[in-house]
Amino acid sequence: MATADAEGLEDLLRAHAPRALAALARRLGDLADAEDAVQEALLAAAGAWPERGVPDDPAAWLVTTAVRRHVDRVRSDTARRAREDAVVVADPGLPTSLAPSRDDSLALLFCCAHPALAPSAAIPLTLRAVGGLTTPGIARLLLLTEAAVDQRIHRAKQAIREAGARFRLPTSPEWPGRLRAVLHVLYLLATAGNAPGDAGGDLARGDAAAEAVRLLRELDRLLPDEPEVGGLLALVLLTEARRPARTGPDGRFVPLDEQDRTRWDQELIAEGTQRVERAMRRGRVGAYQLQAAIAAVHAESSDLAATDWAQIVGLYDVLLRVDPSPVVALNRAVAAGEAGEPRAGLALLDALEGEARRLGHRLPAARAHLLARLGDHAAAHEAYRSAAAAATSVAERDLLVLRAARCRAHISASDEMSGGVPG
């Protein structure tokens, strides 16, 4: 058995908990009971593994322990004694029927996307059950309070139980109705894994993105002719390719325009580009394919100046028709500014003022970027400060504060050259 320090143990438990939950949900047929039992198993592991070492198969250990805890709870509850006969206590040395399989997590994913659930409840439930994100991590990702996240997850589990949802992969007629919700959750899962992370938070780790890649590969194997599955897999792979350059030596978040592109993973770029090209040849172009195509244009550029911004603007034009949203419109405005039209980009941002609340810090940050491109460092400085004040991530706030400071340095240098007194 291997050993693990406190941080390593936390990462290990987080990595194996979703697979254990999926296997136990298959076993018990009840997601709420399975989650309660897995939580008890995680507590047991946190106490046992530091002293006894990490078992060779951590997920199987968690499942076996969770089943035992579930049996103990059923036996101690006389009101539920009738259910005891349905539970078989497995020999911990023979966990074959309990061992997590590759399809368990996918089945759990589709169970969480059951038609009985509203998207507002299904998404946080899936991020918790499949992605292993904690309540604070989900709250940051969805811009909700922690209390709201817990309430939505509770409602979702109740709805699944009342609907009698079966733990299995959907039949062919059921695929279309659930696939869109599943892809949306996997997109959010990958976003969580690649968002600028705060130290010690869920978003600082790549576990969520790695799980999204694994599940998308399985989904692509089952649905090879579904272009949006291939498109989303391509998008996630191209985003993952930039992971090595996304963090500096000091742990600081490094945005796209400052990344060392020699550190990008060329194998992932080649695979992602190939997959998006294949998906788009099928003739049913969707939002994920278009986002992947935009990511591929960035991936093919040696630096920011060499980027084919005109092509990116064109792709955003199509994306706005296929899947219009304020975020897409904002990104299109920035791309227009980078294509040599910063004033036109700023005008497009002005038209988004009515969406300022939904866009949050993104709108003043985009405006600051284009103002700096125009050389208006004073206005850019103020916009960066506004963006920093609205940022919800410490990593993003630190970056925005740094960029505001750079604008301030330009102002000071300009004042000194003109003979003025720096403020």
Image: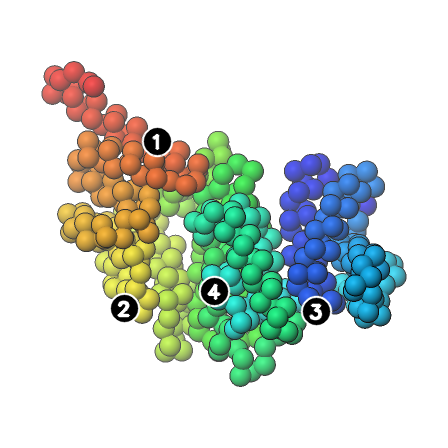
* In this view, the mark in front (2 or 4): 4
Specify few, some or many for label 4: CA neighbours under 10 Å numbering under 14, 14-19, or 20 or more: some
Tell me which amino acid carries mark 3. Answer: Gly
Residue 119 numbered mark, or none: 4
Residue 356 numbered mark, or none: none
Tell me which amino acid carries mark 2. Answer: Arg
Mark 1 vs 3, N-terminal side: 3
**How far across and down, in percent of the image, does residue 365 sit?**
29, 42
**How far across and down, in percent of the image, does residue 39 sit?**
70, 51
* Mark 4 vs mark 1, CA separation in Å: 37 Å
Q: Which residue corresponds to the image point at 39% horizontal and 36% vertical from the top-left?
A: 397
Foreground of the two, 336 or 394 = 394
Foreground of the two, 243 or 396 = 396
**How far across and down, in percent of the image, does residue 73 sit?**
80, 56
> Horizontally, is 415 left or right of 102 in the view?
left
Task: Provide the residue designation for mark 3.
Answer: 29
